[in-house]
Image: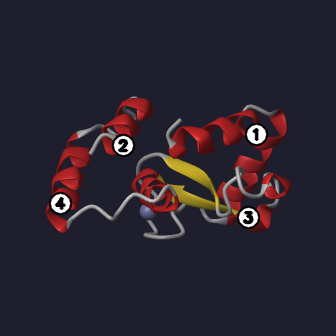
Amino acid sequence: MALRDEYRRHSRPVLKTRRWQVLRQVILERDGWACVDCGTRRGRLEIDHVKPVRDRPDLSFDPGNLATRCSPCHTKKTRIECGHPEPSPERRAWSNAVTSLVADDATPDIRRKRCWTQ
Ligand SMILES: [Zn+2]
């Protein structure tokens, strides 16, 4: 099993809970509905487990372990956690160009899948 699937397998049950849905709103409010890395308020904002659920399940609902990140910043962080190298500048420029062509409300799963197959 790929490591990223392993991470997802651990976080999915957390993300399904009512508790998470409420907490998610709290974190978005706390972070001012902006990505903590790049500050963007555009696009899809996600709540990142700073320490992955796989490693620290006890911190799954700890606000101190949660941060608002935009999809590109979240993906970048997860890639590094999963041991993927940083994409080359050329690859990143291409990725950004393609992402900018995709509407903000496009199906997130498709956007994510494209990131992972780079
Ligand atoms: Zn960002």
18 or 4: which is nearer to us? 4
13 on left or right of 96: right
Tag 4: amino acid: Ala
Q: Residue at x 21, y 65 (%)?
A: 88
What separation in Å lies between label 1 and label 3 (alpha carbons)? 14 Å
How many numbered marks does the figure carry? 4
Amino acid type of the residue that numbered disc 2 sits on in the rendered structure: Trp
Q: Specify the label residue 93 is tagged with.
A: 4
In percent of width and height, residue 7 lies at 61, 45
Please tell me which residue lies in front, 63 or 42.
Answer: 63
Q: Tell me the SS state at disc 4.
A: helix
Element on which disc 3 rests? helix
C-alpha span from label 2 to label 4:
16 Å
Q: Marks 2 and 1: in contact by CB < 8 Å?
A: no
Residue neighbourhood size for the residue with mark 2, other residues' Cα within 10 Å, grouped as few (<14), some (14–19), many (≥20): few
Q: Which residue is mark 1?
A: 14
Kind of residue at badge 1: Val
SS at badge 1: helix
Taking the image as shown, residue 93 lies to the left or right of residue 30, namely left
Q: Which mark, residue 116?
A: 2
Q: Position of residue 18 (x, y in %)?
A: 82, 34
**What residue sits 35% from the left and 63% below the top?**
85
Q: Position of residue 113 (x, y in %)?
A: 37, 35
Give the Cα distance between marks 1 and 4.
33 Å
Whole-Å distance between the Cαs marked 4 and 3?
Answer: 30 Å
Q: Which residue lies under the disc numbered 3?
A: 65
| Residue placed most toward the observer, 7 or 26 | 7
Three-letter residue code for mark 3: Asn
